[in-house]
Amino acid sequence: MFTGIVQGTAEIVSIIEKENFRTHRVRLPNDALKGLAPGASVAHNGCCLTVTQIDGDLVDFDLMQETLRATNLGEVIVGDHVNYERAARFGDEIGGHAMSGHILCTAEVIKVTTSPNNHNVRFKLPSAWRKYIFTKGYIGIDGISLTIGEVEGDEFDVNLIPETLERTNIGSREVGDRINIEIDPQTQAIVDTVERVLPDMYQRMSQQD
């Protein structure tokens, strides 16, 4: 499990391409290496990956074809920086919201508005996932736990504080970029339950009439 509180960004220092497979070698800062061992989970742009090898501050992660297809990790190149978060431990403070590290879809950046005291990013979401997006709801964007701002059709925006811009890579996102989306699992469960239960309820009520 993850909390959506990104701990920093890590540089992609090499990429090994294989058939339908890829290995990313990432340079992690010293404070992220403490207790890290092969088999541990680390989220990259919100996507849960498994440590396969550690060599000093260089850490390897394997990515399957489905991960490369369904997330923006298939688009990163050497020199790019990804948001990272190590898996939460029992007793850790949950400063964001519970996240699984399983990316449901990607959204496109369609507008970036910057002012002296605000940084606003607007996204277009695949229509199939629109039903889970609500103003003031939680959402995971490249692994960052954020509160949804305005929602209009398949579009929504978020407002970013300086700390988030400093700690993550979202401040460098531009129009056309594809970002990873994880829907709040509680919201998803509620919406799916309501969609499943209401038709049956209406049917029973109509039969009683």
Image: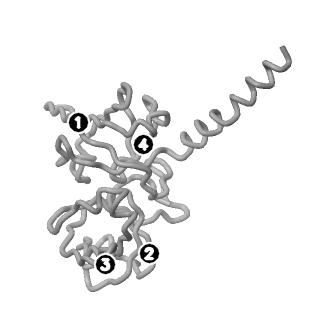
Callout 2 amino acid: Ala
Indicate which disc, 4 or 3, sits on the residue closer to the N terminus: 3
Residue position marked by numbered label 1 in the rendering: 110
Q: Considering only vertical position in the picture, is 204 above or below 40?
A: above
Residue position marked by numbered label 3 in the rendering: 60
The quadrant where residue 107 appears = top left
The answer to whether the residues at label 1 and label 2 have Cβ atoms under 8 Å apart is no
Indicate which disc, 2 or 4, sits on the residue closer to the N terminus: 2
Cα separation, mark 1 vs mark 4, equals 17 Å
The answer to whether the residues at label 1 and label 3 have Cβ atoms under 8 Å apart is no
Indicate which disc, 1 or 3, sits on the residue closer to the N terminus: 3
Residue 52 spot, x, y in % from top left: 38, 81
- Label 3 SS: strand
Residue 40: assigned label? 2
Q: Residue at x 44, y 58 (%)?
A: 101
Q: Considering only vertical position in the picture, is 42 above or below 17?
A: above
Residue position marked by numbered label 4 in the rendering: 139
Indicate which disc, 2 or 3, sits on the residue closer to the N terminus: 2
Q: Nearer the viewer, mark 1 or mark 4?
A: 1
Decide: few, some or many residues near mark 2? Use Cα within 10 Å; few <14, some 14-19, many ≥20: some
Residue 69 spot, x, y in % from top left: 34, 60
- The residue furthest right is 208
